[in-house]
Image (cartoon, helix red, strand yellow):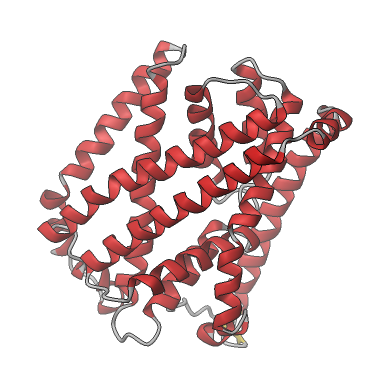
Amino acid sequence: MILPTFACGWKNGWPYDWQFRVVRMIWLKITLSLLLLGYLGWTLDGAAIAHQLMQVQWLPVLAATACLIVGQLFSAWRWVWLARALGLTVDAARKIQLYFLGMFLSLFLPSIIGGDVARGWLLARGRAGSGWLAAASVVLERLNGMVGLLLLISFCMLYLVLPEWWRWSWFAGLLLFLLLMLATPKWWPWLQGLSLTPRWSGWQQLPLASPQFSRAWMQSLPLSLLFQGLVVQAHVLLGQAVGLELSWFAYGFMVCLVALASALPLSFNGFGIREAGYVGFSVWFGGTAEAAGAMAVLWVLVLAVASLPGGIVLWRLGGASILRRDQG
């Protein structure tokens, strides 16, 4: 990994200023998450949430966990297709293992980016000149998933009563985004022609305008939609387990928008933003705040259980020490 060198010096291979900024950013994220969670804890009826959790029927929770695990398998296979189209011929089983490893690290590291960096890093390890390809495969897999997210939100909006200004603004923005994506063969060669230093020119070799990558991208979109649909269904099951009665389309709108918001690098792994989003949208659609809070607690539990395969992968690879060795 290439890191900038600062005049302030180095410590253990890392620049002091870089270390300070990363630590400060992590603490800012933790602070925001704690403030949001603290506000929810102060405004919501904790006893009512605890009572609903004690009355939970666990069969829907197990079904929700299965939905998420199956969805992650689809998402991992999407990464396999896109990485192959970029020229990374790593064994598919290896990529699926690294995908679940990234999911595990994303839950326990200070940002979802942490898990993505780790799986991209391990994918490129031992393959000279594949750093840009591995990084691009991770970014593009996330981007493909975001397209599926946007399409599912748009579909759900057709069945909901929403302000017209919001509806038309959303669809206009989506149309511009999709046109820009479809025009990649036109503008990507222009970017490849820019004159850059060799250190930062590696991304210009990415075959984003090739027919092979275009096919892989389009083939991956149904997997993205299926993955997002399974995530929504998992929330529907959890909501039913705690008595949060909303339509499937309200769940889809809520879950996907909250996923977009919690992916922003503003909080610790989305904690606080995700729970506040669930409560706010649930109340807006006619649900109760306490039921939404109970569903949010169950979702964290489901995430933890579904990420356990990644913990097993990390243990088999040698634990966190393998990440430290790679960073060194």
Q: Which residue is pictured at 76% across the width and 46% down the height?
A: 34
Q: Position of residue 41 (x, y in %)?
A: 82, 35
Above/below status of 84 relative to 147: below
Q: How many marks?
A: 0
Q: Position of residue 163 (x, y in %)?
A: 45, 12
Relative to 194, 26 lies left or right: right
Q: Position of residue 199 (x, y in %)?
A: 30, 78
Q: Position of residue 241 (x, y in %)?
A: 68, 32
Closer to us: 32 or 251: 251
Would residue 233 be visible to someone looking at this image?
yes
Q: Which residue is pictured at 80% across the width and 31% down the height?
A: 52
Closer to us: 102 or 207: 102
Q: The C terminus appears in which quarter of the rendering? A: bottom right
In the rendered image, the residue lying farthest to the front is 59
Q: Residue 279's quadrant in the figure?
A: top right
Q: Which residue is pictured at 63% across the width and 15% down the height?
A: 286
Relative to 218, 244 lies left or right: right
Above/below status of 274 relative to 68: above
